[in-house]
Amino acid sequence: MERRARVTVLPPDSRGLREVRVGAETVGRAWSLRDLRGILRNHGYPRDMDLEDRSQVSWSGGGSDVWPDHPRRRRATIGLMAFGLVACMALLIVIGVPDAFDAMTFAGRMTGFLFILGGVTEAAAAIATFDYWGKRSLNISGAVVLVGVLIAVTVTTLLVILWFQETEATIYTLAFFPHFFWSLWALWVVVREKIWRGTPHPTKIATGVVVTAVLAGGNFAYSALYQPTAVPANLVLQVRYGTPRADLERPVIHIPVTLYLKNTGAVGLYVLADGWTVYGRTEKYVEKSTGLRDRQPALEAGEDIARHIESLGWTTLGTGPFSGPGTWFEPGEEYSEQKMVEVPKNAKYDVLEAELEAMVMRKDHGMIDMDAFGTAQESWDKKSTFYCPPKDCGEWLVYHAEVRFNSNVITVTRKPRYVTSWWHVNAEDSDWDASISTFSGKGEVTDGETKQEYRRFDLFTVDAQASIPFADVVHPRAP
């Protein structure tokens, strides 16, 4: 009969594990008798070995009935810790992927990739929990779990702080608030167990975590807060009259009007709404005057004031969109169109005035689904989200799309925002406007919300005007 080395079972450690030796060699650690038999079987001992035979097995620090492990508590800790880390992994990846591949700035993309890297780390930490609260065969498993917990605490704390700025309930609120409280529990567990003990180079690991957190926070602050306020945005509009031409057959004068746009700033711009209009102004000449005329209306409208001229009204001669919703211009890009306005030769206008206006949004403040935004919905279409009977509302073209914040970290803590642009023409004039709000086709929007979103997304309006005496149109001056 083959003689095998004697088995020694040492006293349980602080977690209830008992080291198992065969001769002078440590062959494993056991939680229970069943665990012990498995270790011995793997080393050639029979399945039915008599563990009470003192000639074969030596028990130190307690006999075969001393197994102080608490398997339910230990497994519950493993389960809760692993579940929370996996949930944090999913949250980090969901937040990071949109920014990593679609962010408008390099810093924004870096932040996205750092979030994805954090998600990968959380996955590794979830796997390490089974080793750390198990046999601890890897001496770095505790450090990996600690890093995962610190990342979870940092990220969920940031999300909670951002959420409290607006306190808007979203589907993500149901994810990061419970996870925030889980991360506090997980931090308490790892501190209570001093999980860093036995970890090689704990100071270097802690430094790496801090540096990564600072880098991610710096990138987030730069892309979401600093850059959108520090980088200048500027749009130049111009309106120029061309040489009028008389029609050869009809008593009509054709007046070319050139419209021009150029992004002279350092950041891309979305066009939310724009339009051009050429007006014919009718005036009354007053030879003797007692003072400046039309003072109150001019003050209200912010217009010029004349002494000998009394304005009798404005007539719209031509109007329409320019580049239109759904377009955008990167720094240095320009765009031009020539419009043609026809005016009767015997018209009684004194001055022709052309106006070009555009409302734009900085691209580094948010991202618009331009495919959706560039498609108009008719207000008179009963299938449209914005249907309204023409007898009640007139006739409108409506452009509508979702706006994503400039960082997905902010997006998950806010309700969805939508950009809506309207274009309306009646028998005498045209009108347009655009706004960003929580309005999705239903409900109402307050003026306070609209103003807040104007500031948040930095919407601004630019215009340009050009005037020409109608006499120069009817009787062009010689060059």
Image (cartoon, rainbow, N blue to C red):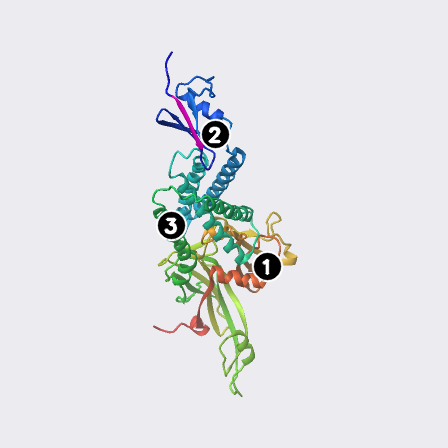
Q: Which residue is mark 1?
A: 445
Q: Is residue 8 above or below residue 218?
A: above
Q: Which residue is mark 3?
A: 212
Q: Nearer the viewer, residue 339 or 43?
A: 43
At label 2, the amino acid type is: Gly
Could you tell me if the residues under marks 3 and 2 are in contact, i.e. CB atoms within 8 Å? Answer: no
Magenta-drawn segment: 6-11
Q: CA distance from mark 3 to mark 2?
A: 47 Å
| Residue 454 within the segment the image draws in magenta | no
Mark 1 vs 3, N-terminal side: 3
Mark 1 vs 2, N-terminal side: 2
Image quadrant occupied by the N terminus: top left
Q: Main secondary structure of the magenta part?
A: strand
SS category of the residue bearing label 2: loop
Look at discs 1 and 3 and give the one toward the viewer.
3
SS category of the residue bearing label 1: loop
Give the residue drawn at x 37%, y 15%: 3
Q: Which residue is mark 2?
A: 62
At label 3, the amino acid type is: Thr
At label 1, the amino acid type is: Val
Q: Nearer the viewer, residue 96 or 306?
A: 96
Q: Residue 375, percent across and down? A: 51, 50
Could you tell me if the residues under marks 1 and 3 are in contact, i.e. CB atoms within 8 Å? Answer: no
